[in-house]
Image (cartoon, helix red, strand yellow):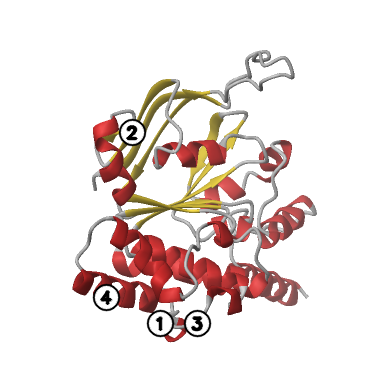
């Protein structure tokens, strides 16, 4: 499987603030410090980190919103610092942000989804096909003639995702797409993300602070103070409860329950990350207890 994203020794610091005298202040410390990370095509990677850790800064490098101060970022082999590749990179890797209202530009759902393909110069018949397919992919086809203002937060975010899908990207980067949504909206968006990854093979990079969302990924990368400090499968990462807490992060509730049971002397797998796994473990514990009696 080829690499979709290749970050090599990535360093980035935000420009200093301009003071009242019009002069720049002291240089900021690096937000990313020597980050090297590869993400394979067709994978689903979750990136975690507390506020200010650098996870969103990393995401913006994938779409060339930000460019490295040092090191390189390549998307499907294209260097984001090469201006001649910018158009192709943004077609290859679409970006979905936290607030869908910042991405929705039209007054009708299908017109909003058609906006990007129109700007890419796609022919009208092809735009029609892409819009219909994108809306069906996110379960919003029946709302194609609605005004976005009539939609719920989760529905708006799915429309924003459809707008990215209509550009036919091979990779979608989602920067905390469920942060402003209620539980139902979060579930709708996560179901859409999983379906796009599993059924269409789209590479997913999900920036999130919801541990249950990260548990659904193939891989979890934890960034702290601009450095990659953990990188493994969800069970391997989340089983390190004490380390995660030391980084200011939580773990899925069922993983913490398993950890607490182990602390209390009950033998339970520390790599439980789903409710189903937790239920099976609890049943096994009760069964052993009954046999012991």
Circles 2 and 1: CB distance less than 8 Å? no
Binning the other alpha carbons within 10 Å of mark 3 as few (below 14), some (14 to 19) or many (20 upward) gives few
The Cα–Cα distance between marks 3 and 4, rounded to whole angstroms, is: 16 Å
Closer to the N terminus: mark 3 or mark 4? 4
Pointer 3 residue: 146
Query: Which label sits in the foreground, 1 or 4?
Result: 4
Residue 192, quarter of picture = bottom left
Q: Secondary structure at mark 4?
A: helix
Q: CA distance from mark 3 to mark 1?
A: 10 Å
Give the mark nearest the N terminus, 3 or 2: 2
Judge whether residue 195 can be spotted in this image: no
Mark nearer the viewer, 3 or 2: 3
Distance, label 2 to label 1, CA atoms, is 34 Å
Q: Residue 132, percent across and down?
A: 32, 78
Q: Residue at x 27, y 55 (%)?
A: 120
Q: Residue furthest bottom?
A: 142
- Residue shown at the point (58%, 53%) measured from the top left: 176
Judging by the rendered image, the residue that carries numbered circle 2 is: 80
Mark 4 = which residue? 128
Residues at marks 2 and 4, CA–CA distance in whole angstroms: 30 Å
Compare marks 2 and 1 and give the one earlier in the sequence: 2
Q: Are marks 3 and 4 in contact (CB under 8 Å)?
A: no
Q: Please tell me how crowded label 2 is: few (under 14), some (14-19), or many (20+) other residues with Cα within 10 Å.
A: many
- Mark 3 vs mark 1: in front: 3
| SS assignment at label 1 | helix
Q: Quadrant of residue 200?
A: bottom left
């Amino acid at each position: 499987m080829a690499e979709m994203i290749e970050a090599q020794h990535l360093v980035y610091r935000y420009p200093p603030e301009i003071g009242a005298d019009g002069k720049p202040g002291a240089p900021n410390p690096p937000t990313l410090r020597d980050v090297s990370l590869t993400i394979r095509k067709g994978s689903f990677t979750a990136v975690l980190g507390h506020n200010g850790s650098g996870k969103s800064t990393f995401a913006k490098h994938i779409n060339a919103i930000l460019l490295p101060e040092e090191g390189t970022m390549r998307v499907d082999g294209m260097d984001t610092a090469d201006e001649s590749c910018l158009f192709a990179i943004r077609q290859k890797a679409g970006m979905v942000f936290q607030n869908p209202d910042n991405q929705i530009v039209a007054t009708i759902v299908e017109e909003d989804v058609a906006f990007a393909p129109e700007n890419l110069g796609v022919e009208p018949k092809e735009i029609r096909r892409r819009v219909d397919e994108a809306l069906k992919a996110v379960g919003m086809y029946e709302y194609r003639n609605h005004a976005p203002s009539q939609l719920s937060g989760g529905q708006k975010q799915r429309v924003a995702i459809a707008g990215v899908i209509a550009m036919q990207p091979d990779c979608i980067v989602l920067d905390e797409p469920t942060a402003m949504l209620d539980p139902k909206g979060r579930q709708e968006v996560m179901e859409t993300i999983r379906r796009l990854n599993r059924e269409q093979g789209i590479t997913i990079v999900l920036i999130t602070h919801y541990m249950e969302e990260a548990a659904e990924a193939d891989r979890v990368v934890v960034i702290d103070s601009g450095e990659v400090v953990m990188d493994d499968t969800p069970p391997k990462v989340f089983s390190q409860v004490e380390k995660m807490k030391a980084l200011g992060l939580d773990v899925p509730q069922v993983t913490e329950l398993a950890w607490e049971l182990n602390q209390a002397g009950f033998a339970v797998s520390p790599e439980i990350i789903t409710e189903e796994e937790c239920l099976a473990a609890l049943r096994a514990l009760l069964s052993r207890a009954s046999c012991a009696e």
